Amino acid sequence: MAKLLPVDPFDCVVLGATGDLALRKLMPALYHRWRDGQAPESSRIIGGSRTELTSEAYRTLVREKFEEFHSKEAIDEEAWAGFAERIFYAPVNLGEADGGWDKLGGLLDNDEAKRRVFYLALPPGLYGQVCANIVGAGLKTERTSIVLEKPIGSDLESAREINDAVGANFAEHQVFRIDHYLGKETVQNLLILRFANSLFEPVWNANAIDHVQITVAESIGSGGRAGYYDKSGALRDMVQNHLLQLLCLVAMEPPFDVAADTVRDEKIKVLRALRRMTPAMAKEASVRGQYTAGVADGKAVQSYEEELGRASDTETFVALKVFIDNWRWAGAPFYLRTGKRMSARRSEIVIQFKNVAHSIVGPDADRLRPTRLVIRLQPDEGMKLLLMTKEPGPGGLRLRYVPLNLSYAETFTERYPDAYERLLMAVVRGDLGLFMRRDEVEAAWTWVDGVLEAWSKDATDTFNYTAGSDGPAQSVLLLDRDGRRWFDKV
Ligand code: BG6
């Protein structure tokens, strides 16, 4: 039976309460924590946004959206009734100091010892002002935390502005910057895999590892977010945060414990060691793509430009060859790839070890394939270690490449909390380990700004790829030039 870490009673204020994130992810996550008995009885959830609604109407909306995004069957009626009773709502004009904060404040518990969380499910441009308004309305207590959704800015400069504006009202230990990938089970397991097993660490370096591939492929398109997405693109939307966080966890030095700052200190060293992308490198080391019409998830789908309703150069796919300039990784590239409308939803890390030094099976060395560790983050979470084995039976030395297989679904049969459930409870516990520190976000932007600048100077093309494929052909060439290939079929 999963062990629930006790959390203190809390008031969780969700600002942007009628938005997609709040209704699709946050409310369901809070419901599940409530149903599993982790959220204490006296906890409350308070929604705030511009829309005029009563608490009753908001409860109905939360329920409707839960049924739309999840399933009615996932609801335990008794638990839902208890959960719904704890939901309240106040209309607030969030950007205004006198936007109705007093009404929202009136719904909060006066008990200063209670945890108070403000979740800003809002456009980042509002973060600074909203933080000032919370403080101005006297709603900040000693035990108040602020949760910021990504993206924190669209480049280093705007990220700094946001961090400064938030920092003017909240201390760093009160600020929880979400990268929801850090809440995923399999992502957390990277630390355990690497540092709770003695097998890997001695070979976890460029002496033994040929290269690393990190793929986050999605079959969905830009969805209803084309307005935001078109200003962002895959590099800012996915690489700056999720892929770089994965890269850090794979590449960092062993932290001496799992305290928040110990791990974050190690991750930031990796970000600082990333080789800056120069315009001269951009053509060889990066590929941008955009999907055209095709078939994804078995349905005919429009091109990105059709969804957007106009022409655009924004990349919906990016592949990069990245070097980490330190002793551990010198010479071993990390290939990163992410895209929308790809052939399937699949997030995976492939650690490809070097070929054996000498083939004992004679000149027919083609038969030997390199050892690979494939870490599947989603879906079908698990790990495969691909090894050469002798096929049993007569007929000479016949070799076969087979996986040692750890499937989460087969090994861990209980439901485990999803990323947002875990992250929300970590905020309430005040555990910063799963969140990004200010300097980490800024270091990631520093590197991404280099790529953006290289792209702008070099005017690299955005190549088309058909929706439902694995990206543009140039992404295959990125590895082919190095005598390598994406490892897509296990
Ligand atoms: C978000 C991006 O951060 O992550 C989205 O903004 C993307 O564009 C999403 O679809 C992917 O998350 P997940 O958990 O479905 O892999």
Image (cartoon, grey):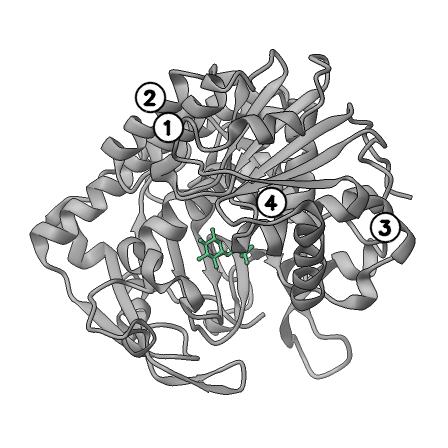
Viewer-nearest residue: 211 or 207? 211
Q: Is residue 392 left or right of residue 444?
A: right
Give the percent coordinates (x, y) of residue 74. 81, 62
- Closer to the camera: disc 1 or disc 2? 1
- Dot 2 crowding, Cα within 10 Å, few <14, some 14–19, many 20+: some
Q: Determine the CA span between mark 1 and mark 3.
A: 36 Å
Which class describes the residues within 10 Å of circle 4: few (<14), some (14-19), or many (20+)? many
Is ligand 1 within 8 Å of the beta carbon of the residue shown at mark 1? no
| Left or right, residue 69 beside residue 349 | right
| Element on which disc 3 rests | helix
Task: Work out whether mark 3 precedes mark 2 in sequence or the reverse, and give the earlier one.
Answer: 3
Which amino acid type is marked by label 1? Gly
Image mark for residue 128: 1
Label 4, on which residue?
A: 187
Q: Nearer the viewer, mark 1 or mark 3?
A: 3
Q: Secondary structure at mark 2?
A: helix
What residue is at 69 percent from the left and 29 percent from the top?
11
Q: Is residue 170 above or below residue 444?
A: above
Read off the residue under disc 3.
Answer: 81
Disc number for residue 164: 2
